[in-house]
Image (tube, rainbow, N blue to C red):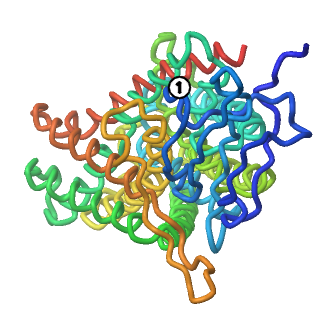
Amino acid sequence: MSRPNPFAQRDRPDSIVEADQPSLTAPAKLSNEKPRRRNPFRNGTAEQSPDTDGAFPHTDYPVDGDGNESVHSFRPLPAFRDTPRPLNSRDVCAFIVNKMVGSGIYTAPPVVLLLTKSKGEALGLWFIGFLYTLISMMIYLEFARRLPHTGGELVYLDETLPRPRLFAYTLYTFYFVLLYNTATNSMVFAQQVLICAAGDVQEPVLDQRALRFIAIVALSFFVLIHYFSGRAGRDLNQVMAFVKVLLLVIVFIAGIVRASHNYTSDWGIKPNKDASSSAIAFLYIVFSFTGWENATFVGGEIRDHQILRKGFIWAVMTVGVLYMLINFIFLLAVPAAVPTTQMAPLFFGGGYHARLAWAILIAISASGSLLSVAYTCARVKQVIGMSNVIPWSRLWKSNSTPETDANGIIMNSPTPQGGLLLHWIFSVTLITASAAVKDTSEAIHFPGNLQAYAAGWVGSNFTFAFM
């Protein structure tokens, strides 16, 4: 007997209406597959509950003559079909752009040059980082093609590391619920707002209580957008992605102007002999490229893999090429012995208006990341709630009720209200917990550092699983 193939392609419904019809038998042409169970802890029957995004009710699992669940009790994880519009390639591209383009590209180039001491090595490390991102993207695209479900890494780990049973699933659940949040982005946004409000002050002293209050208000605003209207959140996500790309182009043009007046030709300087400095510089570069995996979290909302692939390639190539161009023009415009780790005075001068423009630019980047991550993470957290591995799962897996017209046609998309609530609670918890850190900069990056550390362990497990 051939071994069941956990990566067999699932048949997915074309609409939410079709998916509402209960299916108790596995498709004949996929008889060798091992579909995913809805709740790994429940035997016998399953209660009525919404599926990945609240559109698919549960049915009782059939049993065989001995009272055991038959193979037909396993159903493929149905793909959520957003009504009236599934996610298209522009949505996918926007999710990735908004997550990738954060503060890293505006802060990392001078730090990398400062660490390497060599323009050639700095540019080479950025190219390696871009290449690393492309390879990682291809791996995740293959996972997404084989397992086209909402959940992303949660599903990939569960399928590739099935033993010990539920071990990888449970570990990732606690990592994602507790640490994968938007606390740092919220506080970065609040920090830039306070810098703008401080006026012409070189190093303003920020009130940490005001900072956390603004961060929670900003977080709540973007979560409420997704809470009441999924489509409004997606449309705003596209607008923010366009603005971010436009800002990258503006920074590149500003760099050209700077380089035309302050060209430096010191490319022959030998690099720093300290290998640890180059390693740290590369970590800064990898951090600047993170976010390319964001769209895989909502794979079940995408009708076809080609849509995901097209959006992925457009986003990663656009951002990657702009990153390389910005770094190249930056290296042309500044000396190898870079005098500062801030790009604002290097590109726009060191005056008040330059600092104000830079603060606004970073605030826009942080708000776009807030919007994008809240949409994708909430859906993964709702899926986690459906597995009943965390307390109060019935609340976390809840969703809004779709509205229908007089003909019974669904007019709006259900939103994962439980997942959004769970995301908001732990983001606010970490914003509040950062009060224990006295230094403002360290407090802002405290939640992000926790997440980055845990993400490193997740990445190590993916490497092991893929091998």
Give x and y (percent) for residue 29. 92, 39
Is residue 294 at all visible to an observer of this figure?
yes
Q: In this view, does 421 lie to the left or right of 308?
A: left
Q: Is residue 120 left or right of residue 226?
A: right
Which quadrant, please, contains the N terminus? top right
Res. 74 image quadrant: top right
Is residue 134 at all visible to an observer of this figure?
no
Q: Which residue is drawn at 38% across and 59% down?
A: 367
Q: How many marks?
A: 1
Examine the rendered structure and indicate whether residue 332 appears above or below residue 412: above
- Which of these two is toward me, 39 or 262? 39
Name the outermost residue toward the bottom. Answer: 406
**Residue bearing mark 1:** 282
Q: In this view, does 237 lie to the left or right of 429?
A: right
Q: Which residue is drawn at 62% across and 17% down?
A: 162
Examine the rendered structure and indicate whether residue 396 appears above or below residue 44: below
Mark 1 belongs to which amino acid? Phe
Q: Which residue is drawn at 59% across and 55% down?
A: 56
Give x and y (percent) for residue 461. 57, 17
